Amino acid sequence: MKNKKDKSKDLDDLKKTIAENKNIFVTGYEKMTVKQDFELRKTIKGAGGDYKVVKNNLAAIAGEGTSANELLGSLKGMTSLVFTQADPVALAKALTKYAKDNAQFTFKAGMVEGRVIDIAAINDLASMPPKEAIYAKLLFLINANATRLVSSINGVGRNLAVVLDQAIQAEKFKQ
């Protein structure tokens, strides 16, 4: 059993982790085997996240005074937290895929960019394309409009040159 000093250190570490991470997924892991837990940890690490099993009351105390207070205030059952400072979409995709393959792993709630979300929103988040794909589409749209503008400007000059050339050609035939 842990002494008071170790418990206090665990609480401080959890508070620091919660404060540093704006993306948190609260999950349940009842009846998972050691092998499944190992695979889960490997999946989370591969998606750029960290995994921590927590006591519900410790999580509630650590969440007090933070944006995660609503998320961690009323947890029940066996609880683990998955954190990331990186892309929450990639982690949500990895966790959702793992949850489909392992029924023992469940979502309870989540927090993305400091806003609490429910299970349906986590599934919606997992179906989104990654940030890089969204940025690529956005840049394509911006670039496409700029390309059209440049083509239009060039086209006006080109058309003017053609009209002038035709006028000159017409004058030559009259002489």
Image: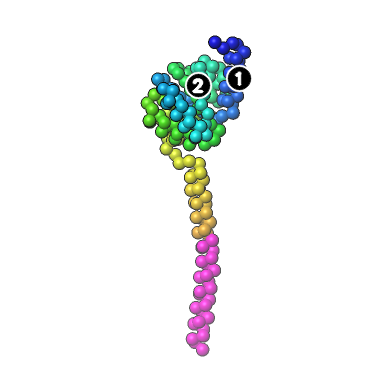
Taking depth in this image into account, of 62 and 38 the one nearest to the observer is: 38
Query: x and y percent of residue 27 in the render?
Result: 45, 24
Query: x and y percent of residue 90 in the render?
Result: 48, 36
Query: x and y percent of residue 1 in the render?
Result: 54, 10
Residue at 44% across, 35% down: 93
73 is higher (above) or lower (below) than 88: above
Badge 1 crowding class, 10 Å Cα cut-off, few under 14, some 14 to 19, many 20 or more, is few
Q: Residue furthest front?
A: 35
Q: Which residue is mark 1?
A: 12
Q: Is residue 151 visible?
A: yes
Residue at 51% across, 85% down: 172
47 is higher (above) or lower (below) than 3: below
Magenta span: chief secondary structure:
helix
Give the colour scheme shown.
rainbow
Q: Amino acid at mark 1?
A: Asp
Taking depth in this image into account, of 62 and 32 the one nearest to the observer is: 32
Q: Which numbered marker is on residue 53?
A: 2
Badge 2 crowding class, 10 Å Cα cut-off, few under 14, some 14 to 19, many 20 or more, is some
Q: Is residue 88 visible?
A: no
Taking depth in this image into account, of 171 and 73 the one nearest to the observer is: 73
User: At numbered mark 2, what does the secondary structure look like: helix, strand or loop?
Assistant: strand
Query: x and y percent of residue 114 in the render?
Result: 54, 30
Q: Is residue 97 within the magenta segment?
A: no
Residue at 50% across, 21% down: 53
Q: Which span is picked out in magenta?
A: 150-175
User: At numbered mark 1, what does the secondary structure look like: helix, strand or loop?
Assistant: helix
Which comes sooner in the sequence, label 2 or label 1? 1
